[in-house]
Amino acid sequence: MKAFDSCNKLETLDLSKSSFEYKTETYFDGLLAGLTNLKELNLSGTGIGFLPTVIPKVMNQLETLDVSHNQISWWKREYFSNLTSLRKLIMASNQIDTIHSSSFPAGRIQSLSTVDLSYNPYSCSCENLLWFSKLLKTKYATNKFKNFPKGYLCSAPSAWEGRMVIKTPISDRYCLLTPVISLIITSVSVGLLLLIFTISMVYRYRWHLRYFVYMLRYYHIRFQRLVHDGCDYRFDIYLSCSEEDVDFILENILPRLEGELNLRVFIPQRDGIGNKIDGIIENMDASRRVILFLSDTFAADHYCEFETSLAYERVLNERRDLMIVILLEELKVVNVTKTIHRVLNVEEYIPWDGSEQGVDMFWLRLIKHLDSPDEPRP
């Protein structure tokens, strides 16, 4: 189509509200190529989605360009380079969301007397609008930009939707700090989550972890004793019981063990000093045998369970009859931990019976265990 081929002297052309929605670059090349002296061109409301490249190619005399109320969202970097005579640019109500310094040649905006880029869906981010935001905040923006400032609003992000561009914090400093702040917030958030997860796991498995750590120390102590070929024990018996059962032990058991049988007995509640866990490891390893007095309160005590686990490990590693299990009362099923269950299955326990005949039978069985030879198991 070459409707204006013979109109090379035409200076004003108004094609507003024409239907150019589906027209191509080729169509506009044929339509406008002959308008070399055109000074005013109006393509507003025509439905175009791009700026025809024929305009900067042939219209170097163009002073006014109106492409408002269309679907234009972008244009080539060098598009306005040849339009050196342009003084009035109207691109209001399009789909422009991004304007960079490269959107216009250096100084082109300053050379325009009127610019209308209002009512476009601007994406107010450092990446998309830093240069334009700084431009709108300059002194001459009020006179140069039409519909300023209320016509220049953010459509994104959602937190700034409807906010005037000049009211956003977008600036060189803000855009420099934003990635750093985002990185810091992300790092701190991940760190806090990991810390909370670690703390919760440590708290949940705190006794397992303490047991693991102190078992390592226990093996170290055992290794040192083997290296130095130490066979002497400071105690004959390490006696493990709950706090609630201590008085009973001191009144009914200890006098015969230390008095009549002349045994050296270590009781943590009576003899322990310093860190209790450290004392358990050091003094149990320094004892020839371990006696466990099981009860419901014993089963609920974490220190007692640790002592049970340590004694059980010694039995497995040293393969000796060094553990004697005494059942002070029938344990409730809910109180039988895995460790205590293993001990009761492996060792033949001695029940306590408070009757006269029962007490005699108890001591016969206990003395028999104490008198058994301290020899390795097969």
Image (cartoon, rainbow, N blue to C red):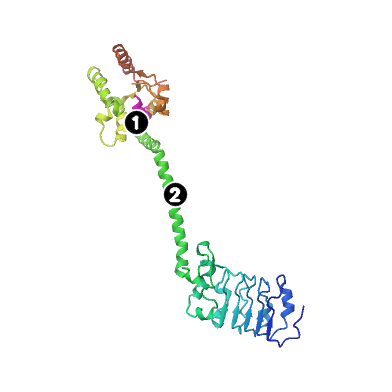
For the N terminus, which image quadrant? bottom right
| Amino acid type shown at disc 2 | Leu
Label 2 with label 1: CB-CB less than 8 Å = no
Label 2 neighbour load within 10 Å: few <14, some 14-19, many 20+: few
What mark, if any, has residue 57 been given in the picture? none
Residue 61, position as x, y percentages in the image: 65, 85
Q: Which residue is mark 2?
A: 193
Q: Is residue 119 above or below residue 282?
A: below
| Earlier-in-chain disc, 2 versus 1 | 2
Horizontal placement of 345 versus 65: left or right?
left
Q: Is residue 327 above or below residue 188?
A: above
Q: Amino acid at mark 1?
A: Asp
Horizontal and vertical percent position of residue 118: 56, 74
Q: Relative to residue 341, is residue 7 drawn left or right?
A: right
Residue drawn where x is 56% and y is 83% of the image: 113
For the residue pair 175 and 146, the one nearer the viewer reads as: 146
Q: Which residue is mark 1?
A: 301
Residue 54 found in image quarter: bottom right
Q: In the image shown, does 240 or 235 lie closer to the viewer?
A: 240
Q: Where is residue 8 shown, x and y percent of the image? A: 72, 86
- x then y, percent, for residue 108: 56, 80
Residue 231 can be seen in this image: no
Q: Is residue 57 magenta?
A: no
**Is 307 included in the stretch rendered in magenta?**
yes
- Range of magenta residues: 294-311
Which residue does the image show at 32% across and 32% down from the upper left? 281
